[in-house]
Image: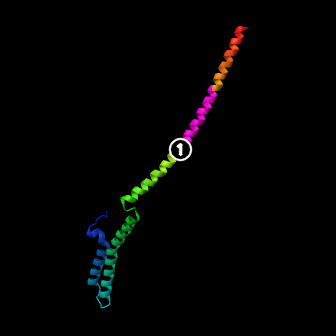
Amino acid sequence: MIEEKSFIQRFWPALLISVVVLIASFFLPVTTFSAPLLVAVVTAVWLVVGLMPKKAVEAAALRVEKAPSSATDIDQEISGLLDDIGLIVSDELSNAQEELVRVREVLADAIVQLSNGFHGMNEHAQLQEQE
């Protein structure tokens, strides 16, 4: 939302120039050349100060127009992001499952070797008892 300013806060440069020109017109001799010049200066200052906020409002309006303007655009963007996240998570899960299969294979081989080692030691111990 555009912040509302008081009249003096918004137009103080133009008011200052107007007061300076008014005071100058009392002390300086007014000629046919200086009177229109003073009016032109004051008018130009008021136009510049008056049009500056319009430019700021127009710039803000352009920024708003460039942003996604409807809820469906935002929903589509969120949907696309969620799809991307889903693909990344499924890839990571498949990698984790592959690693889990490898770990299980290594553990199964280790258990078989350990079991064979115990059987071998048991047979060796039984042979020693028989001797």
Tell me where residue 75 appears, x and y as whole percent.
39, 56
Q: Is residue 19 above or below residue 61?
A: below
Q: Main secondary structure of the magenta part?
A: helix
| Image-based side of 90 in relation to 121, left or right | left
Residue 95 or residue 50, whichever sits in front: 95
Snapshot quadrant of residue 19 = bottom left
In percent of width and height, residue 119 lies at: 66, 19
Q: Residue furthest right?
A: 131
Q: Secondary structure beneath disc 1? A: helix
Residue 107 falls inside the magenta stretch: yes
- 54 and 119: which is toward the camera: 119
**Tag 1: amino acid:** Glu
* Residue at x-position 33% and y-position 82%: 41
CA neighbours of label 1 inside 10 A, class few (<14), some (14 to 19), many (20+) = few
Q: Position of residue 102 (x, y in %)?
A: 60, 36
Q: Decide if residue 118 is on the left or right side of residue 71.
A: right
Q: Is residue 39 depicted above or below 50 in this figure?
A: below
The C terminus: image quadrant: top right
The residue shown at (33%, 72%) is 54
Instruction: Give the residue at mark 1.
Output: 92
Which quadrant of the figure contains the N terminus?
A: bottom left
Q: Is residue 41 above or below residue 56?
A: below
Q: Residue furthest bottom?
A: 32
Please report the residue visible at 29 percent of the width from the left and 78 percent of the height from the top. 18
Position above or below: 116 against 128: below
Residue 87, position as x, y percentages in the image:
50, 49
Which residue is found at the position 63% from the left and 26% from the top?
A: 112
Give the residues drawn in magenta, as a range. 94-111
Left or right, residue 81 beside residue 61: right
Residue 57 located within the stretch drawn in magenta: no
